[in-house]
Image (cartoon, grey):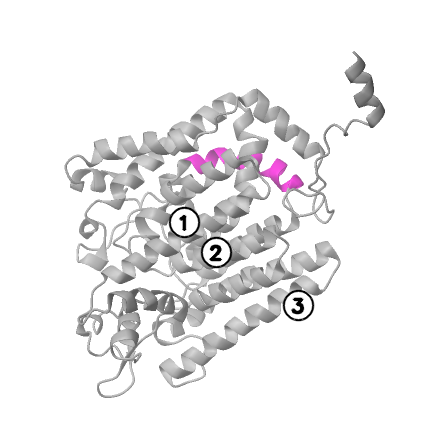
Amino acid sequence: MAYPAWTLVHDHSLNIFSITTLTTTGWAEPRGPGQLHSDRFPGSIFWAVPFYAIYHLKTFSIVPGTISAVWACALAMFFIYRTLLNFTKRETALGATLLMAFATSAWATASDALWTEGPTMLAISIAMWGLSKNSYVLAGVGYALALLCRPHTAVIAAVVGIWESIARKSIKPVLTIGSLTGLGLVLYLVYNRINSGRWILFYGTYGDRIGAATGSGAGGQAKASLWITDYIYTFFAPLHGLFIYSPFLLLLLPGLFKAWKIAAPWMRSSAIGGILYLLVQLAGNTWTGGDGFFGYRLILVPLLTWIPLLALSWEQWTSTVTWARRAFGTLAAISLWWFAVGSISNNDKLGALDGVGIRNWNEWQVPIIIRTAPPGAWLLAAIFVGVVGWFGWPKLSPTLSSVTHSSAKNQSKPDSQPGSIGSGKGQQSQGRKPLTKAEIRARKKR
């Protein structure tokens, strides 16, 4: 994505032929003599353009692209924090945001280079922020931007739009979200026409993904064995498994049933949309997401869509059970530590993109980054864990937290009813009624 971003600024063209380092990677398609065009999606490319324009470099550098990735992830965390504030306590919102930012691959991978995940997470976080504010226009804009970054995020938009219309008994959500997401699709197709010279949905190496998703022959992904292993490895493989590198998430699973019962419709539909997105993602692609990075990559976007439910799960169960709360804190600290070390370690030792060779599914990356970490990295990472823990760990006692959120649960109504947590309606205080004038006068006489 960084290559065409630079040529758009430097050459005012999508032709990246002058950057010869890309010609052997398989990430571009020739369009004739002296013509080479990237097959990457446009959203991330155009996100990086302003950063290359600011630096205005005469020769290509990856630095502005990396800075754009950092900004995309940082802004995504800002919007997810604002989203969580609309239905959780401030302590929960801050803690969840810090863990998403620093105890997942959002830091070590999506912020480390201009992958599509950073801009996609930013777009999805904007959409969820809009949903939490009952703004379907803002949600539609977010999903349109997400589609430009990763077209199959349209699955999330479709699920949310339809679900919201059913829950609200109104056609407005699906029409608003659908029309704006559809506009994003039109812009995506126009870009492909300009870039490839054809009206086509997928260009270059992506053109084989549909065939891979439906074929069971050589190179096909439509095999029962591949489907099963892809999903198991995505969550549990030592190489890039979600629960291996962010094990604290396991302590949130038992509370999902309680969280689901009180969640607003948009939280449920976002979570289901994230699951379907992952199904589509793995249907035409392998589970690894490539090499040369620490942690995981492809699961980041679905994980972001699950954050609202996971935050409610913390409040409804994990924070109220002593052993679960302590185990969660311990595992979160461990995750923070090795992602801090992994973010500053030598990625040349982590995979095929840097010439080391393809890693096996059962090869754990933590020993690699520990061996290759710069001097002092372990200590600095430990200090960082302490700082994040100081700012992010809830200060309220478990008993008070339990009482508070038990009350919140009783005041909420599930699914389509307007009192659901995070629905944007029925959120007025239902505590003690204001004193009448007669009661005030009586108290003054005491």
| Image quarter of residue 60 | bottom left
Q: Position of residue 355 (x, y in %)?
A: 17, 58
Which residue is denoted by mark 1 in the rendering? 234
Kindly check if marks 2 and 1 are in contact, taking CB atoms under 8 A apart as contact. Answer: yes
Which residue is denoted by mark 3 in the rendering? 175
Whether residue 147 is visible here, answered yes or no, is: yes
Q: Nearer the N terminus, badge 1 or badge 3?
A: 3
Give the main secondary structure of the magenta stretch: helix
Chain part drawn in magenta? 248-262
Disc 2 packing (10 Å; few <14; some 14–19; many ≥20) = many
Helix, strand or loop for disc 3: helix
Cα separation between marks 2 and 1? 10 Å
Q: Quadrant of the C terminus?
A: top right
Q: Position of residue 240 (x, y in %)?
A: 34, 47
| Amino acid carrying mark 2 in the image | Leu
Is residue 130 found left or right of 410 in the rendered image?
left
| Amino acid carrying mark 3 in the image | Leu
| Viewer-nearest of discs 1 and 3 | 3
| Amino acid carrying mark 1 in the image | Thr
Helix, strand or loop for disc 1: helix
Which residue is denoted by mark 2 in the rendering? 278
Disc 3 packing (10 Å; few <14; some 14–19; many ≥20) = some
| 371 vs 149, nearest the viewer | 149
Residue drawn at (27%, 55%), measured in percent from left and top?
291
Q: Is residue 261 magenta?
A: yes
Whether residue 288 is visible here, answered yes or no, is: no
